[in-house]
Amino acid sequence: MLAAERRAHVLTAVVDRGAVRVSDLANELEVSEMTIRRDLEYLETTGELSKVHGGAVRSTATTEARGVEPPSSLKAAREPGAKRVIARAALDLVEDGMTVAIGAGTTTLELARALRGRAVDVITNSVTIFEVLTDPADDTVDASAVQLTGGQRTPSDALVGPLANAALERYRTDLAFVGTHGIDPDAGLTTPNLGEAETNRKLLGTARSVVVLADHTKYGEIGAHLFAEFDRIDRLITDAGLSAADRRRLADVVTLTIADGSDG
């Protein structure tokens, strides 16, 4: 298990239970207590939990604002089932032999996990996605088929900035899959991070077809920076938690796929 995946499990446990013990997490994940302590220290430095004697509790400081991007491990703890369902629906769009661009995000990370072993070339600006797709412990993956951009790392695990943008300008892909902080029928697709917005636009520019992957909790959220209007998007895949009224509003502006298999 990668460090990012382990920390996401730890954070999910803290969010679900309110408090966790080091010994319990070490047993669940089959790692040493020292490894868990290091994970808790890391998550405490990012403000996602608070360490206590023998374990950790939920942090009271994990609130979001329009201009603040929450860390990727915090987002990974939210709606994990919906993200897996969305990723499975997205997988149906990928054919062997394609070249796909995958933007950073916790839902796109689930797609990357599902793509392991598939005969596709991948360009990504996510270190975590790159690690998942090139894991040396998995002999089904072809590390040479995965390209990682350079750039400056953001809290959401995206590599952004001039290096990332210059790299993406050189690629042409069949499909681009991207996540989003916010979806609003009027405001479009947004993120709190200016650098991420700019790099997302470059990533979308590589592709013949663009697909947004976002669970229903992203609807109605508006970040400070627009990265795409709906006329730039070919399909939005979300989960069945989206209300009927919200489905109708989105279906007016974009081709909508509900991840239980029905189209809205």
Image: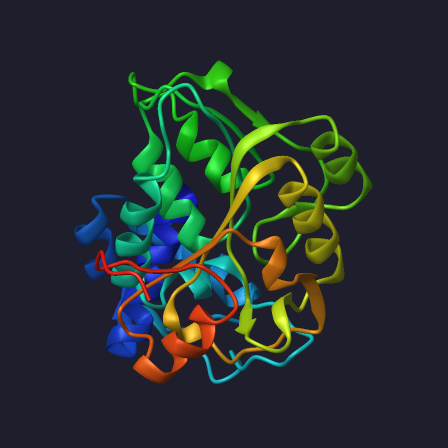
Residue 122 percent across, percent down from the top left: 50, 28
- Front one among 127 and 122: 122
Q: Is residue 231 among the parts visible in the rendering? A: yes
How many dots with numbers? 0
Residue 144 or residue 62, whichever sits in front: 144
Residue 115 figure quarter: top left
Which quadrant is the N terminus positioned in? top left
Report the residue that reaches farthest toward the right. Answer: 162
**Looking at the image, which is closer to me, 80 or 99?**
99
193 shown above or below 200: below
Is any part of residue 1 visible from this angle?
no
The residue drawn where x is 67% and y is 27% is: 171
Which residue in the rendered view is the most extreme toward the front?
252
Q: Quadrant of residue 255?
A: bottom left
Q: Where is residue 25 in the image (x, y as percent from the top left)?
A: 24, 58
Residue 201 placement, left or right of 43: right
Q: Which of 171 and 46 lies nearest the eye of the viewer? A: 171
Would you place residue 215 above or below residue 83 in this image? below
Where does the C terminus fall, quadrant-wise?
bottom left
Q: In this view, does 69 lie above or below 221?
A: above
Looking at the image, which residue is at 40% across and 16% down?
A: 142
Q: Residue drawn at (26%, 74%), measured in percent from left and top?
A: 16
Q: How is the image coloured?
A: rainbow
Q: Where is residue 47 in the image (x, y as percent from the top left)?
A: 54, 71
Give how far across and how far down residue 74 sits, in percent: 45, 65
Compared across the picture, whether 76 is left or right of 128 comes to left
> Is 261 on the left-hand or right-hand side of 121?
left
